[in-house]
Amino acid sequence: MEASSPVSTPEIVFFDLETTVPNKGGQRFWVLEFGAIIVCPRKLVELDSYSTLIRPKDLSAVALKSGRCDGITREAVANAPAFEEVADKIFTILNGRIWAGHNIQRFDCVRIKEAFAEIGRPAPMPVGMFDSLGVLTETFGRRAGNMKMATLATYFGLGQQKHRSLEDVRMNLEVLKHCAAVLFVESSLPSVMNGKWHNPSTMVTRSRSNGKLVFREENSRKSPPTTLGYRRTVPYTRGR
């Protein structure tokens, strides 16, 4: 009898879109860049990557100059492929994988569906979804400030968010690793991380009294008492 092969876990694809920002009523979002990394779910290491600029049908919707140093300008996308030219590649990357990203459920997933609908093709479908905005809001809380990726990256010293698709998804993965490490330490040392530990300024001394060994606690003169603790926060659901 042959041994059954282990069931393979679907790969995770972290992806991000850069788009135009409508500033008037009735205007729409145009996808300007798609970036993704395929990640091993068991090791959280990058297996493959892909990114491309995308030329929108309405070039006038793209700013001539970007307010960001690495931002996307009209000149940058003027000769880029249209969405229909890269749709096959994007479909292959996304379809049948676990989708991950920051605020993808409310933003990126909607834009992907719109882009495929516009060219008359069915959109790719995930087998699962991991939106780090919602997950970190519930588990990590607002200790780092708001839940925007730029704020989280600054909190962990990961540099400045570029607002370019491929750089942002790699930053997203690193933020998740850092948050997971902190939460792991906290869950492993609950009495310490929740403030239920002996004051570090208190020392235990011993002396003999009537032939017996006596232990007593004394306050150190070198440092004042300190209190560190974990504070529960109210979930914050906005930001990207």
Image: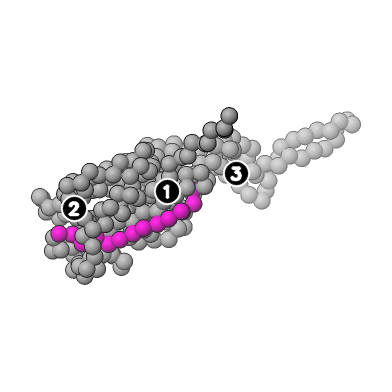
At label 3, counting other C-alpha atoms closer than 10 Å, the crowd grade (few under 14, some 14-19, many 20 or more) is: few
Q: What residue type is labelled 2?
A: Phe
Q: Residue at x 28, y 52 (%)?
A: 88
Q: 217 or 24: which is nearer to us? A: 24
Q: Which of marks 1 and 3 is in front?
A: 1
Looking at the picture, how far across and down is residue 166, in whole percent?
36, 58
Sequence-first tag of 3 and 2: 2
* Distance of label 3 from label 2 (alpha carbons): 55 Å
Q: Is mark 2 on a helix, strand or loop?
A: loop
Q: What residue type is labelled 1?
A: Ala
What residue did someone put label 3 on? 225
Which residue range is magenta in the image?
44-57
Q: Which residue is drawn at 23% across and 58% down?
A: 85
What residue did someone put label 1 on? 144
Q: Is mark 1 on a helix, strand or loop?
A: helix
What residue did someone put label 2 on? 29
Q: Is mark 3 on a helix, strand or loop?
A: loop
Looking at the picture, how far across and down is residue 123, in whole percent?
25, 44
For the residues labelled 1 and 3, say whether their Cβ atoms are less than 8 Å apart: no
* Distance of label 2 from label 1 (alpha carbons): 30 Å
Looking at the picture, how far across and down is residue 122, in whole percent?
22, 43
For the residues labelled 3 and 2, say whether their Cβ atoms are less than 8 Å apart: no
On the rendered structure, is 76 left or right of 1? Answer: left
Q: Does the magenta stretch include residue 46?
A: yes
Q: Which residue is drawn at 18% across and 63% down?
A: 62
Q: 94 or 224: which is nearer to us? A: 94
